[in-house]
Image: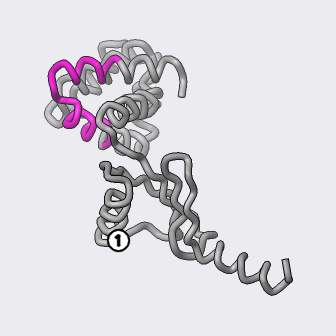
Amino acid sequence: MTDFGREYGEGLYALCAEEKIERDVLQEMRTLKSVLRENADFIRLLGNMTLSKQERVGIVDAAFKSSVHEYVLSFLKILVERGAAHTFAECADAFEAVYNREHGVVEAQATVAQPLNEDQRKKLVARLEAMTGREVVVKEKIDPSVLGGVLLQMDGKRYDNTVLHRLNAIRQAMAGE
């Protein structure tokens, strides 16, 4: 993460915390980050310096004015004006990191072979929250090489309950290692 992304994301968080709207803005930042990730051409358009600032800001207004909080909209406009729309994801990550730290939220990275369905996700989150006594946010990473099960990284620890891990353990046991 760049200093720019951290500074801007933390700045937006501080403003939202004063207004007590950080949870709502966090949800919108996550959603907008996902939308922008899926539409890389849109980010390139917002960074196109052959368009005037007013044109680029107008594009942001037309796309998001009625669908995001005014702080999120203004924040994205500021990034566009500074030629930094491409840093939105970093800023959103910094915002989320401060939110998590301030609210005692634990982030867990779950590597799975296939996306978890809603029931699996709820069960995993409930189990992790019971284990930690804290709110847990699970971020999924898809890696078909794990074959099945879950590789979980949380609080600096790694929990490997994947089929690949089990197969490797069997292979080592059979080889006499």
Q: Is residue 146 placed above or below 92 in the rendered structure?
A: below
> Residue drawn 39% across and 18% down?
8
Kindly identify the residue that appears in the image at 19 percent across and 33 percent down.
68
Q: How many marks?
A: 1
Residue 167 visible to an observer of this rendering: yes
Q: Is residue 33 magenta?
A: no
The part of the image, by quadrant, that contains residue 91 is top left
**Farthest residue in the bottom direction?**
174
- Is residue 177 rendered to the left or right of residue 110? right
Measuring 38% from the left and 32% from the top, which residue is drawn there?
Answer: 92
Callout 1, which amino acid?
Gln
| Prevailing SS of the magenta stretch | helix
Q: Is residue 115 left or right of residue 35?
A: right
Measured as percent of width and height from the top left, residue 11 is found at 34, 17
* Residue range (magenta): 11-30
Q: Quadrant of residue 140?
A: bottom left
Q: Which residue is mark 1?
A: 120
> In which quadrant is the C terminus drawn?
bottom right
Q: Position of residue 59 (x, y in %)?
A: 29, 26
